[in-house]
Image (cartoon, rainbow, N blue to C red):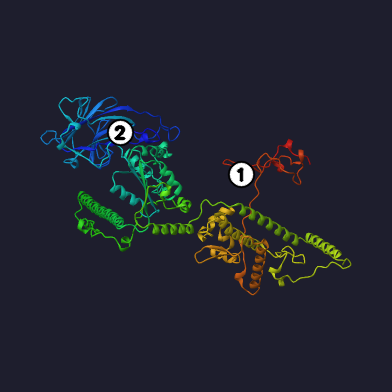
């Protein structure tokens, strides 16, 4: 019986005997014991549930050993189905009647060369023939054929014994009563009802895009008793069951997109059912979960499904330089693909040459037709002069030998011969997933629950170094998608924003004459009070005049006051404030990244990932154009006193994480003075001019909200302006447009005479 939940009700189940028929005339029986009719949710509201039709299906027939178990999927089998069709290689022929629940059917295979119906297969229902003998395809004649059943949403009872439960009108022996010379036993096929005493479960552990799935394919081909448990096999199973798969661009070899249009298959329920059932069947499995097998915690979770002494769990590590056998297989695959591509290209060339030939032929016939028409017209009009006929271009006869075909020996290039791994159309792992998972990659150990750990290509010591180097290279090359700014960053950034606001406020006060006078008066009071405390109250408080340009900025104790009431940043303009803020931003970003990631192998980040982390921390985009430069390295030149980029394009901070804010102000002022000196010396490149952000227009208040009192408008109740005709009103689609007003009448008024004001 087939599985009937989690989407499995849409898939075909299959079974094949381990005894095949190679001579004589024999039959076996089957009957549908029950049908399953489950209610299915619709993929979209108002639409019928999707899925293959018919919902209940049974196919009975014969197939070759080691061929696909799915009847009708390949040329290696032949069958009848419950809908009344004879099927071979997806070609369906209506030749019989349907059969349903409770009806016993008999499938008869006649390989008796002396019989008039030799090499045919027939179908009977309740002892009555419902299909004439159907000839076996040529590719199945003379071969051993094994009874096979494929079914969906039904339970099937089979009889392969010696006695028929429903005899036919003529005598025919059952398979269980066959002569030994007429049957063949497939010793490699697993026997139903007799699970293996100990099942082998293989977990391949390999690197992304380094031959992982090619190794799995080779392993399954060499070990046909192993069943692969993977998403790609579910998709293959669905395709053979008539459930179309819609591949998506974001799919990978490890996790292809499960997009079938069937809710219970799309949401992953089918994988949960298979995971529960697989350990109960007593089979050998290979579990090619690339990412899961590389992460220790996920390996342990997978191993827990196969616990107990009934399973021997083996990890096979496939990393480093592959074996010669694997390399040869890859080379053969590349060569085959190359031959196929050349054949396709040759076919295209031949079709194009044929198209050109037909076009030339069409042109020639068109010219001949026009000449014939002109000649007929001249004859009809009695003109004896010779009609000048259009001379047709001689159509070139194109033969196969004239087509330049790449029919020489196909060989791999030297570059292709050096390839260890074949490139696939899609990656083994999604870049985003790899970026978050690679740091957890590790090698399997027996302590995790494996009975055996084998290294297929390289010894453990070499593989350990390969994995360590790979993880380090990935760390330096990939950005940390799940990195989150920590508390230290939030606190430091908040302090800096507060400091910047205080400095800008102090500059504004310095430039305001009245506020500066008040500041200086207060300063004199403080000096006077200090003199009194020192016993010098009779001295007049004095503020010394200073030549600010002669002061060494790094000796300044208070950036808000150089001693004469002038702040260190008195001459700052827009560009200076932008640069001092950029200095601290990058200083804080580099130190916060190191602190939040807390990974000794990755103390900093690269130039190509800087915009990502900048946005992650500051919630805004970094654009070099904001600083009138084109590249990040050119921008770093502007703040090179706090940050730098090494020859490998990684950022470094030159100040410690506990550097005081005043240091950044002093660096900014020193840089401003240097630019000023260069400008005075005639260096025009020293001048900075940053584009300023466009001013954001004030938001228009919504309709109906009272507005504050405006000068010239008489206040209404509560001090608000009296409501008047709105200047703007919402238009269709949410836009604002100007309200149309009536044209003024005589006298310039738009109101009727009785509403006009009196003069």
- In the image, residue 650 sits, relative to residue 274, either above or below, namely below
Residue found at the far right of this picture = 538
Q: Residue placed at 62% from the left, 66% from the top?
A: 688
Front position in the image: 532 or 226: 226
Q: In which image quadrant can residue 611 be found?
A: bottom right
Q: Is residue 223 visible?
A: yes
Mark 1 crowd level (few <14, some 14–19, many ≥20, 10 Å Cα): few
Numbered disc 1: secondary structure? strand
Task: Residue under label 2, please give it.
Answer: 151
In this orientation, does residue 397 appear? no
| Classed neighbour count for the residue bearing mark 2: other residues with Cα under 10 Å, few (<14), some (14–19), many (≥20) | many
For the point 57% across and 66% down, which residue is it? Answer: 637
Q: Nearer the viewer, mark 1 or mark 2?
A: 2
Q: CA distance from mark 1 to mark 2?
A: 65 Å
The residue that appears at 51% across and 60% down in the rendered structure is 606
Viewer-closest of 282 and 318: 282
Looking at the picture, how far across and down is residue 510, in whole percent?
75, 62
State the image coordinates of residue 86 (x, y, percent, origin top left): 23, 34
Give the mark, 1 or 2, whose residue is nearer the N terminus: 2
Whether residue 33 sits left or right of residue 558 in the image: it is left
Quarter of the image with the N terminus is top left
For the image, the number of numbered tags is 2
Report x, y in % for residue 212.
Answer: 36, 52
Q: Are marks 1 and 2 in contact (CB under 8 Å)?
A: no
Local secondary structure at mark 2 = strand
The answer to whether residue 46 is above or below residue 575 is: above
When asked about the image quadrant of residue 686, the answer is bottom right
Q: Quadrant of the C terminus?
A: top right
Residue lying at the far bottom of the rendered structure:
681
- According to the picture, the residue beneath numbered tag 1 turns out to be 736
């Amino acid at each position: 019986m087939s599985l009937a939940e989690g989407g499995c009700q849409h898939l075909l189940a299959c079974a094949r005997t381990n005894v095949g028929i190679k001579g004589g005339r024999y039959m076996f029986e089957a009957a549908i014991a029950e049908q399953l009719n489950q209610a299915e949710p619709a993929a979209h509201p108002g639409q019928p549930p999707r899925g293959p039709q018919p919902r209940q299906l049974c196919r009975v027939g014969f197939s070759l050993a080691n061929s696909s178990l799915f009847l009708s999927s390949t040329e290696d089998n032949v069958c009848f189905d419950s809908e009344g069709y004879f099927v071979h290689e997806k070609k369906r022929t209506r030749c019989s009647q349907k059969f349903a629940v409770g009806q016993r059917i008999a499938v008869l295979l006649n390989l008796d060369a002396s019989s008039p119906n030799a090499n045919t297969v027939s179908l009977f229902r309740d002892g009555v023939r419902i299909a004439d003998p159907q000839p076996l395809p040529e590719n199945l004649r003379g071969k051993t054929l094994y009874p096979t059943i494929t079914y969906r949403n039904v339970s099937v009872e089979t009889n392969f014994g010696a006695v028929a439960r429903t005899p036919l009108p003529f005598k025919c022996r059952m398979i269980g009563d066959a002569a030994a010379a007429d049957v063949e036993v497939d010793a490699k096929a697993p026997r139903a009802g007799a699970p293996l005493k100990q099942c082998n479960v293989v977990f391949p552990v390999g690197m992304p895009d380094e031959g992982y799935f090619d190794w799995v394919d080779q392993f399954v081909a060499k070990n046909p008793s192993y069943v692969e448990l993977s998403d790609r096999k579910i998709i293959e199973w669905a395709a053979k069951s008539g459930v179309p798969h819609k591949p998506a661009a974001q799919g990978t070899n490890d996790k292809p997109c499960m997009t079938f249009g069937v809710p219970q298959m799309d949401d992953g329920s089918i994988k949960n059912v298979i995971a529960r059932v697989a350990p109960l069947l007593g089979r050998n499995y290979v579990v090619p979960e690339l990412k899961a097998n590389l992460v220790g915690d996920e390996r342990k979770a997978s191993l827990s499904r196969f616990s107990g002494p009934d399973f021997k769990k083996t990890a096979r590590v496939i990393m480093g330089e592959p074996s010669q056998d694997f390399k040869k297989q890859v080379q053969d695959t590349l060569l085959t693909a190359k031959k196929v591509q050349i054949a396709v290209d040759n076919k295209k060339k031949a079709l194009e040459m044929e198209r050109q030939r037909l076009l030339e032929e069409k042109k020639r016939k068109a010219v001949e037709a026009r000449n014939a028409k002109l000649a007929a017209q001249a004859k009809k009009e009695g003109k004896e002069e010779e009609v000048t006929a259009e001379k047709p271009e001689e159509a070139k006869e194109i033969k196969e030998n004239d087509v330049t075909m790449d029919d020489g020996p196909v060989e791999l290039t030297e570059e292709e011969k050096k390839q260890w791994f074949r490139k696939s159309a899609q990656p083994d792992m999604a870049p985003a997933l790899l970026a978050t998972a690679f740091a957890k990659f590790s090698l399997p150990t027996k302590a995790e629950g494996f009975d055996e750990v084998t290294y297929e290509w390289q010894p453990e010591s070499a593989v350990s170094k390969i994995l360590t180097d790979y993880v380090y290279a990935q760390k330096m090359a990939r950005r940390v998608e799940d990195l989150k700014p920590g508390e230290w960053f939030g606190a430091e950034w908040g302090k800096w924003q507060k400091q910047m606001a205080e400095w800008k406020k102090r500059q504004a006060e310095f430039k305001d004459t009245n506020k500066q006078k008040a500041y200086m008066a207060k300063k004199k009071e403080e000096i006077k009070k200090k003199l009194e405390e020192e016993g010098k109250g009779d001295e007049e408080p004095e503020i010394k005049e200073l030549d600010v340009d002669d002061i060494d900025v790094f000796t300044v104790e208070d950036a808000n006051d150089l001693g004469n009431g002038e702040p260190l940043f008195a001459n700052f303009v827009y560009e200076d404030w932008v640069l001092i803020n950029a200095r601290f931003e990058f200083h804080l970003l580099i130190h916060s990244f190191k602190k939040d990631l807390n990974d000794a192998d990755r103390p900093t980040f690269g130039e190509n990932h800087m915009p990502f982390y900048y946005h992650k921390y500051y919630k805004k985009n970094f654009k070099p154009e904001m600083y009138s430069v084109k590249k990040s390295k050119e921008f770093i030149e502007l703040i090179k006193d706090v940050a730098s980029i090494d020859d490998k394009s990684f950022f470094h901070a030159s100040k410690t994480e506990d550097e005081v804010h005043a240091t950044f102000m002093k660096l900014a002022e020193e840089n401003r003075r240097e630019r000023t000196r260069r400008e005075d010396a005639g260096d025009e490149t020293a001048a900075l001019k940053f584009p300023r952000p466009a001013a954001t227009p004030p938001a228009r208040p919504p309709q109906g909200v009272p507005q504050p009192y405006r000068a010239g408008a008489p206040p209404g109740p509560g001090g608000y302006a009296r409501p008047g005709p709105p200047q703007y009103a919402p238009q269709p689609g949410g836009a604002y447009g100007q309200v149309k007003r009536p044209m003024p009448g005589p006298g310039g008024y738009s109101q009727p005479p009785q509403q006009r004001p009196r003069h």
